[in-house]
Amino acid sequence: MGPVIALLLLTSSPPAAAERLNGFDLSGMLVPRESVLRGGPPRDGIPALTDPKFVPAERSGLGPQDRVVGVKLGGAAKAYPLRILNWHEVVNDAVTGRRVVVTYCPLCGTAMVFDAQAGGRRRTFGVSGLLYNSDVLLYDRESESLWSHLMRKAVSGPAKGAELVQIPGRHTTWREWLQENPETTVLSFETGMPRDYGRDPYAGYGSNEAVFFPIGHSDRRLAAKEWILGLALDGKTKAYPLKDCPEKGIEDRVAGREISVRCKRADRSGYVLDKDGVELPSTQAYWFAWSAFHPDTELQGDPK
Amino acid sequence: MISNLLLSTAAAVAPLELILHSTDSVSLAATYYAAQGGEARAGLLLLPMLGADRSTWAGFAAQASAAGIAVLALDPRGHGGSGNPAGTPPAAWGRAEWLAVVEDARAGLRELSARGLAPERVVAAGASIGASAALHLAASEPSLAGAALLSPGDNPARLPSSAALPGYGKRPLFIGVGAGDGAFVDIARKLAREAPGSTALIVQPGSGHGTQLLAGSGGRTLTAQIIRFVLDAP
């Protein structure tokens, strides 16, 4: 890929924005209303999965370098292929009886797993068709509230302010996940939806610097699509560039707590452990997305 | 709000000027924008507004091409560099001539198919009456992935868009319209209401019509929205 030309454009003050978009009530949003945009596909145009089927690893249909989001809870391991998540972005599921929602925003590269119990009740999530900071806005079918994926909270609707509890999820290769979790099951390609999972609608997106939708904050300490592992802990945030993360890991201190960052550069994956070896939720993301949501984020290796 | 749009200057492929032929042997001028960055992730057929030509889509087509979409911008008969067997200006045409425009668009589909983009991976898009033609084409081609319409009309004497909705079925639909564009706003809302499937309706501030909606800062966002709609079409 050769040199790129960056055009930094400042928009003028936007006109008054509608209080409803895609049928969702946006009054009193916790984020600037004018920053919420339609993403292109309509509401549920990217259909969430709500009755996922799983197959044993040997019937996965995956190659070693296929990327997955892995979740391990209560001894059970499940893998959700990105080849499916690219088309659906949300999988409402359960792992050893605990209801979870596995989410992925291809525009931001963010795979995040949450407890489906939020704001005092169990919720089923869909894709609203709206974006904030180029990141998916989920909605729950029970209250039609909008939830910011990277903010981990409801930003409008009856559940406004309710938080999503993030569960550790591993964004890695099938090869690595299977090696560490040989008993894993895999989300089946037989979703019942008419999608060609052999085709990646975002092929090439990660290898060019184009950011399709406006973002509220741009941080040029790294290239826009540089992969980082982001940690949000007790009000502090820090990003660890995955290409620079040593195989022996990083011992660090965030928000006064000792943590260990473990990386596998060959698999472009990483995770964070606390001092007791318990995995903490972390988020692999494109740098532009992480820094847009966390303008004050620390950056590993940043001299300032 | 900061809008960052980074355009790659590398590996850009020059658009290819083509002459296609309709089934009634009318010469049709077209421009093909190959998908950049490898195999095309989707295909897009573009139709212009009444009396305009395919150059009105050039900026958008380049952006879509950079995003990995193969684009064919077509001048239907009576427009741009294409033949005009009717011998009269398009503004004077009735239903029969406009149905022939839908057949011209089908020639565009055949060209995309010959270049490896099967209809299942193609979205038909158009501006104003070009939007109506795109919707009618999609209605008659159930395998097309979808349609994206800018300021569609609903003129019963030409190509009423609403008449195409039943055949279009439950495929997702994209409609963009300018908030100050008079009756076209009502038409867009009506189509969004009556479409059997889900519709992304974008009402853009201002009174732009058709491809005019693609200009300015609002146009950059609209471009991104259409591109994403195309990429995510099943």
Image: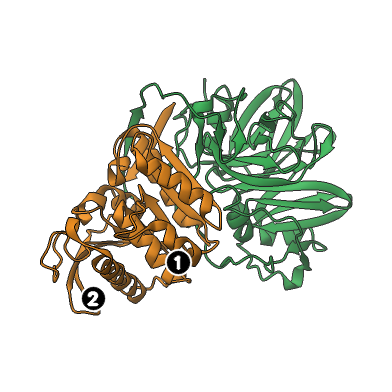
Residue at 53% x, 62% y: name it. Answer: B234
Q: Nearer the viewer, mark 2 or mark 1?
A: 2
Q: Nearer the viewer, residue A10 or A68?
A: A10
Q: Which mark is residue B100?
A: none
Residue at 36% x, 48% y: name it. Answer: B150
| Residue at far front of view | B157
Chain coloured green: which letter?
A: A
- Left or right position of B186 against B77: right
- Label 2: which secondary element: loop
- Which amino acid type is shown beneath numbered disc 2? Ser
- Left or right position of A195 against A253: left
Residue A289 visible in the shown view: yes
Q: Chain of mark 2?
A: B
Q: Are marks 2 and 1 in contact (CB under 8 Å)?
A: no
Q: Colour of chain B?
A: orange
Quarter placement of the N terminus of chain B: top left
- Left or right position of A94 against B33: right
Residue at 21% x, 79% y: name it. Answer: B24
- Left or right position of B115 against B118: left
Q: Chain of mark 1?
A: B
Q: Which mark is residue B121?
A: 1
Expressed as whole percent of the image width and height from the top left, the position of residue A192 reads: 68, 67
Q: Nearer the viewer, residue A205 or A84?
A: A84
| Real-space Cα separation, disc 2 to disc 1, in angstroms | 22 Å
Above or below residue A104? Residue B162 is below
Expressed as whole percent of the image width and height from the top left, the position of residue B26 reads: 17, 74
Above or below residue A247? Residue B138 is below
Above or below residue A61? Residue A82 is above
State the residue position of label 2.
Answer: B22
Tell me the quarter of the picture where residue A78 sits.
Answer: bottom right
